[in-house]
Amino acid sequence: MNTALLVLEDGRVFHGTPYGAEGETFGEMVFNTGMTGYQETLTDPSYHRQIVAMTAPHIGNTGVNDEDPESRRVWVAGYVVREPSRIVSNWRATRSLDDYLKEQGVVGIAIPGTRALTRHLRERGAMRAGIFTAPSEPVEELVERVRRSPGMEGADLAAEVATTEPYVVPAIGGRRYAVAAVDLGIKGMTPQRMAERGCEVHVLPATATFDDIMAVGPDGVFFSNGPGDPATADVSALREVLGAGVPFFGICFGNQLFGRALGLSTYKLRYGHRGVNQPVQDVRTGKVEISAHNHGFAVEAPLDGPFETPFGPAEVSHVNLNDRCVEGLRLLERPAFSVQYHPEAAAGPHDAAYLFDEFCEVMSRAQA
C-alpha cells in the first residue's frame, strides 16, 4: 500500500494511506465532530478550500446516495479519516464513499492518528495543510509548499460557491410568503425547509444588490451560510434591507454579515465549530439547543445586555456554552434576527427547526 502524507504548516506530519482520489491538495485543516452526516459535510459549500478531518473513527459505513447531497458537488479541498469502512451497509446507498471521492476528484488520506491531529489543532489552532498521496519531495519542501498556499483570513469565497443565476424553489402546499434568499453558499435543505412552510424562495447570487433583492417583492430576506472571511464581504445591500424594515433572517455566514451590518466586528476562532453536537443557549429563555455548526469566524458583540446600532438597539440572542461565543443576534425594534448555526438540520439535530417558524411569524406580522 502506498504511503500518503498529511503535512501541516507548523511542520507536523501524519503518515497514512491514500483514500479517495490520488494526487495532492491544499487547504485549511479543520475537524468535524459529527458521528453522522459525512455526505452532507462533503457537499456543504461552507467547506470550500478546507481539508476536513472526521473525529468519528469509522467513516463510510452507509455509503453514498443521490438524495442527501446539499449542493451540486463536493466542496471540501481534502478529506481525512481514521478507518474507512470496508463495506457499504445501507439500502439507500448507490456507491461507496471511496468511489464517490474518486469520482469527485477529492484527495483524501486515512491515518491512525485523527485523535492526535484533533488535539494538535485544538492546541495550535486551524492552519494550512496539504495531503500528498505519492510524495516525491523531501518533507521540508512539502512544508514550504503548504506555507505558500493561501490562508483563510482575508479569503473572499462566497461568489465562488454561489449560484450565478437566480432560481426559484416553489412553496409546498400553497404560497404564503415570498423570500429573497441571498446565496452565499446555501445548502439545499435550507430553501426546502422554508418551502415546507409555504415560502416561495427566490435564490439570488451572492452579488445581489438591494434592487435585485427588492425586485422579488419579498416578504422576507434570508442570508445563507457560506465560506471565507466575513470581513471581506460587502454588506451595503443588507444595510439597505435593514433600513427598509424588511424582515430579515440570517444563518452562519449570514449571521456574521448581519453583525457587520450592525457595526460589529468579526474575528477568526482558534479552531472553529464544526459538527452536529454544539450546545447553544437562548439567553432569553435559558433553553439549550444541540445544534449543527460549520464556522471558523464569529461576531464580537457585548454579552451583558442590549447595545446600540444604526438600526436601533440589538442584543445577543444565543451563546455557545462551550466557549461563550456569539451564536445569535436580534434587533429589538426591527424584524431582524440571525443565528450562527444551521437550523435546517442536514445533517444534524432538529432542535432549531423552530427558527424557520419564527421567520414566518415575523413575515406574517409585517404583512398585517
Image (cartoon, helix red, strand yellow):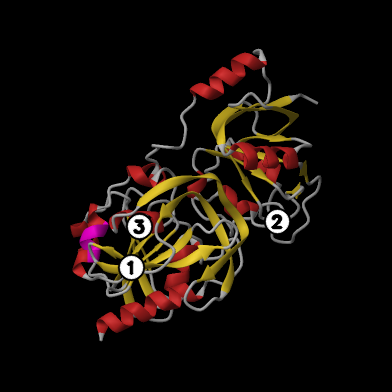
Magenta part of the protein: which range? 238-242
- Callout 3–callout 1 Cβ contact below 8 Å: no
Q: Taking 194 as reference, is 120 left or right? A: right
Badge number at residue 259: 3
CA distance separating discs 1 and 2: 36 Å
Q: Is residue 56 above or below residue 342?
A: above
> Which of marks 1 and 3 precedes in the sequence?
3
- Disc assigned to residue 35: 2
For the N terminus, the quadrant is top right
Residue 162 shows up from this direction: no
User: Where residue 281 appears, x then y in whole percent?
Assistant: 54, 69
Secondary structure under tag 1 reads strand
Q: Earlier in the sequence, mark 1 or mark 2?
A: 2
* Closer to viewer: mark 3 or mark 2: 3
Residue at 67 percent across and 19 percent down: it is 135
Please name the predominant secondary structure of the magenta segment in the image. helix
For mark 1, does the 10 Å Cα neighbourhood hold few (<14), some (14 to 19), or many (20 or more) residues? Answer: many
Which residue does the numbered mark 1 point to in the structure image?
Answer: 314
- Seen at 62% across and 59% down, the residue is 276
What secondary structure is marked by label 3? helix
**Residue placed at 73% from the left, 50% from the top?**
56
Whether 240 is among the magenta residues is yes
Is residue 68 left or right of 178 when viewed as pictured? right
Q: Nearer the viewer, residue 314 or 296?
A: 314
Amino acid at pointer 1 = Ala
Residue 226, how many percent across, how many down?
43, 50
Decide which of 194, 272 is in the foreground and name it: 272
Residue 367 pos. (x, y %): 26, 82
Report the disc number at residue 86.
none
Q: Residues within 10 Å of mark 3 (few under 14, many from 20)?
A: many
For the residues marked 3 and 2, what is the alpha-carbon distance in whole angstroms? 31 Å
